[in-house]
Every structure is written in structure tokens, then in C-alpha cells.
Image: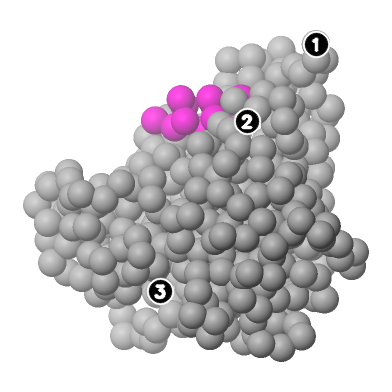
Amino acid sequence: MTQTVEPATSTASRIPALPGLDATWRLARDGYLFGTRGFRDVDADAFRTRLLGRAVVVARGAEAAHVFGTPDAFSRTGAIPRSVMHLLQDEGSVQQLEGPRHEARKRLMLDLAQEERGGLVVAFREAWPQVAAEHAHRPVPVRQVASLALTRAALAWVGIRTEPADERALCEDFDAMVSRAAAIGPLNWAARLRRRRTEAWAREVVRDLRRQGDRATVAGRLAHHTEDGRLLDESVAAIELLNLLRPTVAVARFIAFAVHALHRHPDWASQIRGGEPAATRWTADEIRRFSPFFPMIGGIATRPIELHGARLAQGQWVMLDLYGTDHSAELWERPDVFNPGRFATASPMTVVAQGVGDPLAAHRCPGEQATADLLVATLELLTQGPEYAVPEQDLRISLRRLPAEPEDRMLVVFGG
């Protein structure tokens, strides 16, 4: 890989270096705790190291989040491996754009993801009991149920009708894109083949929407979106359609952690069951803060930046430790304790599980508010019906597995 050559004005050496020539093995060993253990070893909130031979600065905390969230300070291009990028973003998508084109496309995605999110939540509330009934009376991983319910809801939300078999296939494809993003070798290759299959399906959807002249549905608005007076390239429109659907299905991982949290903290489950709206919203925010979702995000500095008293050169690769920031004692009192009550005073915008900065100007997930709303709906559904039981199982969560989930995949039995 090409390494950044820093100019003489760079003072990156002021950031302590992690011991060793390359920390790739530590990342594989430590998973979500890679940053936390590194910060402990250097006794600082940032360190220098190499990953796959490439120089990188890893940082956490309020200052790092502020710097990383500065508009146009970082580019995503080249900041994550292509194997990950293809599954979670892909070339030409909004996440890969910069400057005015990024702002224009991001505004569209925000309009679709935020202004129309009420319809998504309504569709999910309808889909959840249907899918739960389809999986009743046998142990089933919550993520399996949630993924199918979210797929059904997302397709209805954007205005796409599918056959049940196609719905299940899309659900499995979307789940594989997230589950295998951090994998290497055959598992990643298989997921990328699934991605290509869904891209072909999405291109056909875009063609159909354009032939029908559909500009009323969410998918139709996207298919007919223009930039510089021209319709989006068919492949790009298809990718952006997937960027509405796939992240919605990824919320299934938070839903599994929601079931885990309610099981481990019945006092908060009782408050939600009692109809306390504040407790419900606080619990949704604490699930997003506390749970291991994506461990880090990366960026390439588009100009010299200041971080922890050091000047980092343009072109410097920087990684913001999301999990470490959400568990930082600088930002959170007793960060490793699950306590939704902290949001009586804390701002949910301080949670960086889905990126940092202004959603329009920076690279924060445009679907963050939809995620929070879906979790609120989930908590209400879990505490008000349909009924479910949690059988005996291993509820430990390994932070070495990327992405993380309970050891036995958080099994439940619906219907008793």
C-alpha cells in the first residue's frame, strides 16, 4: 500500500507511538478493544501505528470526534479496505463523494431517510408481529426475525413489492453484507457475490420505476433524482437504493442488543412496559451507546489538521474509535455501566455509534434518527407483545468478533 509522506511541518511525532512495527495482529486479537487497549498502553487518547504496513493515527474522545466531524476535513476515499467498502458503500455512492456533489446527494438521502422515516416505523410495527408469528414456538435468533421484519418494512417504505421468496433472499443478502464486511477470504468473497446479485436486482428496479414514471414513492424519487440536469447513472441510483435498504436491515443488530438489554435489566423493561416514553427513548439511546456496533471509521485528511497538540499532514490516515469514544470516561460517567438514565441530561448526539458531525456536511449516517425511532418502536413491541421467552443460553458478547453479537445469537421463543 502507498504510505503517506509527511512534510517537515508535520508534528505527528508528538502523538505517542504504539509499541511494535505494525499493529494489524493487535487489531485482529482485540477487535472492538483495539483502540481502548492502545490508548491505555500509551496513556493518551491518540496513538500512531501501522495497519497492514500503512501509517495511521487512531484517536477517541470529544476532541477527536470534533475534528473528525469538521465539514470537508476528511475524505472516505482510500480510508477503508475495498473489501469492506464494496459491501457497505461502493463506488459512486454518497459516502464516496466530496464537496458540492456530496452535499447535494447527502441532502437527498437525508430527505428520504429522515422526512419519510415515520412511514418506515409504521411499516416495521406491522411487519414485526407478522414475522414473529411465522417463527413462533421454536428458538430463533432475534436478528433473524428482526432482519426479515426490517426487510419487509423497508421494501414497503420505499414502495417496492416483492414475492416472499425474493424478500427472504434480499434479507439474507443484506444481512451477509454487514456480517461479512470484516471477514477475509472466501466468506468475504461470497458476500460480495451476494452484493452483486442485489445490485443487479436494484438496477432492474430503477429501470422499472423510470419506465413507469413513478416519482411518488421513496424509490421513485431516488430513481428520478437528477444531478447537473441529468438522471443519476442507473448503477449509481441502484447503489443508493441499496444504501437505503441495507442500513435499515443492519438495525437488526441493535434489536438483538435491545432484547439482551431488556433481559439483563428488567427494571428498565418494567418502566417501558409501564408506558414511560422518556424511559423508552433513553433506553434506545443507551443501547446505541453501549452496544458494539461498528468499531471505527476512517478518513484521509484533506488538509493539515490539529489533533491533541499535533499537526497532521494532508493525506494522513486517521481512524476515530467509535466504540472507545462511546465508552470514554471523558464523556460518560461510569461508561461501562448500562444506564439509560444518563440521557436525562446527556445529549444523544454525543453518541457516535453511527458517525460524527452534522449529518449533511459530515459523514454521519443519514439514517441515525430512523435507527433511534426503530429502536423505540422495538422496545415498545418487545414489552407490549407479541410475547416471547428467552431460553437458557450463553449471553456473553465477545468483543473480538466483528460485528459482535451474543454468543448464542440471542435466541428467543415467540408465543410462549
Placement of 189 over or under 49, stated as above or below: above
| Residue occupied by mark 3 | 410
Residue at point 58%, 15% (across, down): 216
How many marks are shown on the rendered structure? 3
Mark 1 Cα shell of 10 Å, populated few (<14), some (14-19), many (≥20): few
Magenta stretch holds residue 218: no
Q: Amino acid at mark 2?
A: Lys
Residue 69 drawn above or below residue 133: above
Q: Which mark is residue 229?
A: 1
Q: Quadrant of the N terminus?
A: bottom right
Residue 192 bears which disc, if any? none
User: Residue 4, percent across and down?
Assistant: 84, 61
Judging depth in this view, the residue of 338 and 169 nearest the camera is 338
Whether 111 is among the magenta residues is yes
Q: In screen coordinates, is 67 left or right of 224?
A: left
Q: Position of residue 375 (x, y in %)?
A: 35, 50
Magenta residues span 108-118
Precedes in sequence: disc 1 or disc 2: 2
* Residue 221 in view in this figure: yes
Query: What separation in Å lies between label 2 and label 3 (alpha carbons)?
Result: 35 Å
